[in-house]
Amino acid sequence: MKKLDIFKKGLFVENPIFVLLLGLCSALAITTSLTNAIGMGMAVICVLIMSNLIISLLRKVIPHEIRIPVYIIIIATLVKCVQMLMNAYTQELYTSLGVFIPLIVVNCIILGRAESFASQNTIIDSLLDALGMGIGYTIAVVVISFFRELIGTGGLSLFNPFDGSQVIFQFELFGDYAISLLTQPAGAFITLGCILAFIQFWNNRKSKKVGGQ
Amino acid sequence: MKKVIQMALFLAIVAGLSGAALSFVYNLTDPIIQEAAIASEKENLVQLYSNGEEFKVVETNFGDYPTLQGVYEVIKGGSVKAHVYKGSVTGYGGASSPIVFLVALEDGKYSGYTVLEASAETSGIGTRIKDAEFKDNIVGTDIGGSVDTLSGATVSSKAVVNSIKEAAKHYQENFK
């Protein structure tokens, strides 16, 4: 049961974007379309799993004083590898994510999980933590991009992130009434703010209910 | 002191391992990346060279050459035969819909010229940069020599001529 909790906490209770507010830079920048969000989510899951795994493996070997530089080297190497692999095998995703792939290096989620979890826990636990956090990140960016794309362009589209010619679905509902502000960077902040406010409202209501009974 | 050396060594080993991992992945992916980079341009390049030549992207810095977008080596029988430049210039259609063209440089002469995109130019006026009249102005003349613009289509043709001059300058500085 405890193992399941480690996995589950990243999804909602400690969701990296909505609750911990980590890694916002990339999350706000790439959420212009569902396809980008899913592609970025997968890249983050990959890097997070590998970095947590390696750091957990080496947690007894890495000297405490220089742990941060070591983490950064490991994470930067992994990100660069993922970047080159994406450039080679998923050209279109690579061009649309652009500069934000190298930015995974400084994504605080990964360094944060390495420092606060993987460096103190066993490999299995770290793996579960990485999976939970990675999926939590993906859910969060998918939710943000869902609203941004729907309201910003008046429609929704999803392509296979690994092969841009494969359309999964694409439709337009109210293209004439789209609020294109939401596809701009400022729209990302507005969307995130509204979602955070909603989550806060929900939590307050829940705790009030519990208190009232 | 001993601890410091130990830590420095550890960091050096980690960095070395990461370098090894990176070079491994680089060797694995680089050929695919190169091929993908040329694949999108290949259908354009065969307009100029279509006798089974191979093409290769040349990595270069176009900081001083704002209208140039890419340069490709044309390889025939294992040796570099010519260089093709891709230029993108603002014509009469404005900056949002530029004129895109290729110009080939071979043995001190311009050996080929083709327009890929000029849909925003005025039909019959600006689009004359696609015609044989203008092409003959360029192809066969010496690199670096002056190229006449088209009277009546000055904006479009002058933009192209200026970009060809940039290509010639880049060529003489890098491949001569």
Image (cartoon, rainbow, N blue to C red):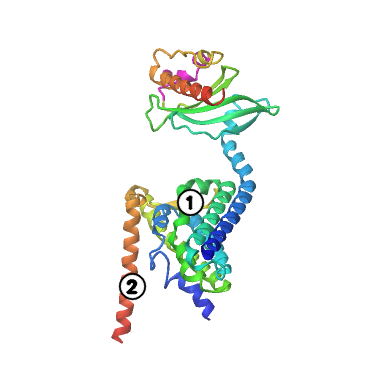
Q: Which mark is residue A32?
A: none
Tell me the residue that label 1 is attached to.
A102
Label 2 resides on the chain identified as A
Q: Is residue B146 above or below residue A8?
A: above
* Closer-to-camera residue (A158/B144): B144
Residue A75 is covered by the magenta coloring: no
* Closer-to-camera residue (B36/A67): A67
Screen quadrant of the C terminus of chain B: top right
**Could you say whether the residue bearing mark 1 is in a helix, strand or loop?**
helix
Q: Residue B83: horizontal and vertical position, in percent?
A: 58, 25
Tell me the residue that label 2 is attached to.
A202
Q: Amino acid at mark 2?
A: Trp
Foreground mark, 1 or 2, reads 1
Q: Amino acid at mark 1?
A: Pro
* Upstream in sequence: badge 1 or badge 2: 1
Q: Residue B168: horizontal and vertical position, in percent?
A: 50, 21
Q: Which residues are magenta?
A: B121-135
* Closer-to-camera residue (A208/A152): A208
Q: Is residue A122 above or below residue A212?
A: above
Q: Is residue B30 above or below residue B50?
A: below
The answer as to whether the residues below labels 1 and 2 share one chain is yes
**Could you say whether the residue bearing mark 2 is in a helix, strand or loop?**
helix
Q: Is residue B123 above or below residue A33?
A: above
Q: Residue A116: horizontal and vertical position, in percent?
A: 46, 70
Residue furthest out toward the right: B77
* Closer-to-camera residue (A53/B122): A53
Residue B114 can be seen, yes or no: no
Residue B106 can be seen, yes or no: yes
Label 1 resides on the chain identified as A
Magenta: predominant secondary structure element? helix
Mark 2, other Cα within 10 Å: few <14 / some 14–19 / many ≥20: few
